[in-house]
Image (spheres, rainbow, N blue to C red):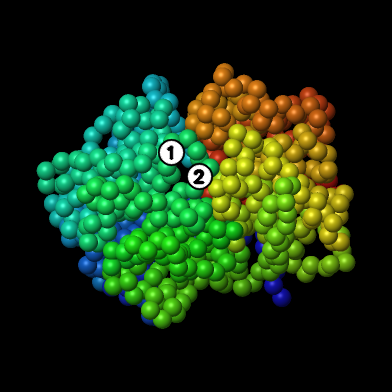
Amino acid sequence: MKRRITAEDLYAIKLINSCHLSPNGESVIYSVQEVNKKNEKKYSNLFMRGLKGGKTKQITFGKKNNGNVKFSPDGKLIAFISNRENEKLSQIYILPVDGGEAEKITNLKGVIHDFIWSPDGKKLLLNFTNFDKEIIDMIDNKKKQELGIKVRHINRVFYKLDGVGYRLKDRVHLYLMDIKRKKVEQLTKSDIHDEYGAAFSSDGKKIIYASNVSKDPDLDPMNEDFFIMTLKTKKVKKLKLPEGPKGSPSFSPDGKWIIYTGVKGKKDGWRNNALWLADTKNEKPAKNLTKKFDIDISGWTIGDMGGTANDNSPKWAKNSKDIYFTTGEKGDTTLNKIDIFHPDKIQKVINKHGVVGSFYLDEQNENLLYYYSNFNSPGDLFSMNLKTKKEKQLTGVNKNLLSKIDLGTIEEIWFKGSDNNDLQGWILKPPNFNPKKKYPSVLEIHGGPQVQYGTVFMHEFYFLAANDHIVYFCNPRGGKGYGEKHTKAIDNAWGTVDYEDIMKWNDLVKKKSYIDNKKMFVTGGSYGGYMTNWIIGHTNRFRAVVTQRSVSNLISMYGSSDFNWAFEHEFGHKPPWENFNSYWKQSPIKYIGNAKTPTLVIHSENDNRCPQEQGEQIYVSLKRLGVDTELVLFPGEPHGLSRGGRTDRRIERLNHILRWFRKYSE
């Protein structure tokens, strides 16, 4: 008989956090992350297997992090990033596919963000940032480590980043690494500009990369451009393209075209991230290939397990006319193909309920490797023969664990919102569900808001269901996956139609015969926390709520979040001192005097996205009002505690949520 999932199962769940397909399409290499319960650290090791069969072979061992793995162009070597020699200082290593010892080829004191192989396999192009001198001095000096940083002198606007902390003084630059000589050449230099998203031309003579070369990029963050550098001469050419944010550029195999993702315009964040085509000579205007389809080129279907969605950038077919790309639509992330010469039709390559993350083609375009997650799995690797369309599951990293667990059942429902608009939602029922029984329920609200819930593994949902709660969730207006009109609906209008859609969803669910209307609860994090705060100021229909990593006061959040002043783009493109009433009108704290709902406030002390004071304002206000409330803080954790935090803290968080709901179920 199967058991129910527990909070402690987070220790047992394994995650594939990088993968790559050999150029000949015969082998796949990937890294698997596991949690060490004794020290609460996470470690990753590399595994290899054939696409057609054979045993899976582990090729790195030990309590280290080995990831971001990539085959060389000839398939004879793999390169990966590892902290095997220094826990706080990762380097790039090269390992022969046929076996042998891994060789460290870099000795850099900083952060290697990413790397790519040159087409001839002789060089690596690095995205790298140097540590500050004070940090370098501390690396091998225990006394200085104990004393810590003496002072922080800040002169840029975006000076911190959630999950990272204070930014390094150096910017992200491009470096070319000669593997044989182990010599690193810095290609780009600037005190205020970053370079990222680089790619080689097929002949290896040029690279393309993105950069914002504004006078002050922090004050004009959407002004991104592409640049082509000829490596022999170091001559750089800026491409003339529509203004706006851009990413993931790549040359076609024949060198005639460039594809990239981007949004036209620098202000409208609700617009779809589209697939664009430009000619290499930059003689014709760039073309939006996906404009007519009203879809967003992204994989923003959120779960709480992490996993490898780190390389879902668009990729060329070898014929230089077909493009493979992912898009988030109606709760799924699908893999698609479009012909650049006939972009009137999109072909679905992987079109099943679930989420496609990283994907790769072999050099002959015969085999496809892709990472895939759904309601029943945190994520595994699959292959598809592109000629026969035959698919094969390559890994089952959580098969033994999940085969013993009953997750419950999920029902998909389409319903009408407050303006007769079509909306999608799901109801998760506990294991051994009894339709004649009355259950307490939890309404889950997603963050973002420009993301979507969907067909992906959510441990938190299953945990609550395992403890006999009905869990229901939907995609109200403001999120992605349902077209621009759906996303634009809350532009400078948070807490309006999104709130109305969620209440319509609640109205529908509470009419179900198995719902106990006296035991209905709400929780959400980030924007979901914002909406939870909004709910307690606008209705008393819920018995208790848990607000997590929330937004409460848009005035005080201005400048204190790592998003900084850029929140203006969500609220009329003006700062609070020019548009105070609009910010205040959309702030949940404005309505907190109406609140009577018992509220548990959960926040992380290192949350740079939604600063701790946002949760504290709700907590103190409710205390002042005499409403039952508690504050739970997690030291050392960033905004993403629920999906990537230290495992014991993730477990503690889940238990606090359950405790609070149980308190008000008695």
Instruction: Locate residue 455: give its quadrant.
Output: bottom right
- The number of numbered badges drawn on the structure is 2
Q: Position of residue 416 (x, y in %)?
A: 73, 54
Residue 11 sits in which quadrant?
bottom right
Q: Residues within 10 Å of mark 1 (few under 14, many from 20)?
A: some
Image spot of residue 432 (x, y percent): 78, 69
Disc 1 to disc 2, how far (Cα)?
9 Å
Q: Is residue 139 left or right of residue 238?
A: right
Residue 662 x/y as whole percent:
80, 49
In the image, what residue type sits under mark 2?
Arg
Identified by mark 1, the residue type is Gly
Please name the residue shown 51% across and 53% down the image. Answer: 294
Label 2, residues with CA under 10 Å away: few <14, some 14-19, many ≥20: many
Say which residue appears at 57% left-offset and 31% top-offset: 571
Quadrant where the N terminus lies?
Answer: bottom right
Q: Quick one: SS at disc 1?
A: loop
- Residue sitting at 66 percent across and 25 percent down? 584
Residue in front for this viewpoint, 27 or 133: 27
Is 28 positioned to the left or the right of 164 in the image? left
User: Relative to the observer, which residue lies in front, 326 or 255?
Assistant: 255
Rendered image: mark on residue 561: none
Q: Which one is nearer the viewer's eye here, 239 or 36?
A: 239
Residue beneath disc 2:
271
Q: CB atoms at circles 1 and 2 under 8 Å apart?
A: yes
